Image (tube, rainbow, N blue to C red):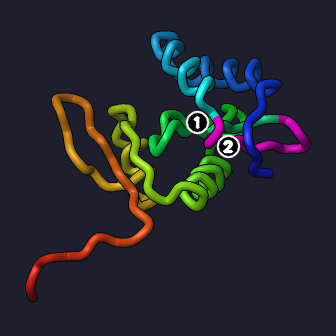
Amino acid sequence: MICPLHQTDYAVAKRMFHDTFDQGEDPYFVEAWRHRSRSLGIRISGVLVGVALVVDSMLRYIYIHHEYRGSGMGTQLLRSVMDAYPNLHLVPVDAPEIIAWYEKHGFRLSHQRGARRVYVRHRHALRNKSIE
């Protein structure tokens, strides 16, 4: 079940975050959590098993409990976020399989500054200006 995140979810969300990301990301998690009004979680039998932290129009983090990875829950959570906020952008980790997953769901490279790559997804397909 997809649902909004609540303050009572903090401990579980942070524990899953630490299981997924480097400890150096912790200040960014805290900041994203503070601005979680647009964020969603996914639950099984009332237990939080996935989190998508959205700040403004940026998908800061999306992660699923390790026991449920590969089950389609990440895709379900991402689709719910995309339905709620159709014009998203993100800066994915530099891992080909992660980038391919976002591209499979409609995100495209917008621009790059050094190693930082920004991907965007728009509700409406952009016009193809090529002439056939």
Picture coordinates of residue 101 (x, y %)? 44, 50
Mark sitting earlier along the chain (2/1): 2
**Which residue position holds label 2?**
40
Picture coordinates of residue 14 (x, y %)? 67, 20
Indicate left or right for 85 with 50 as reference. Answer: left
Counting every numbered tag in the picture gives 2
- Residue type for callout 1: Leu
- Residue at 69%, 38% in the rendered image: 50
**Which residue position holds label 1?**
53
Instruction: Assign a secondary structure to mark 2.
Output: strand
Q: Residue furthest right?
A: 45
Indicate left or right for 105 with 43 as reference. Answer: left
What segment carries the magenta color?
37-47
Residue 30 lies in quadrant: top right
Q: Per the image, is 45 magenta?
A: yes
Q: State the CA–CA distance, disc 2 to disc 1.
A: 7 Å
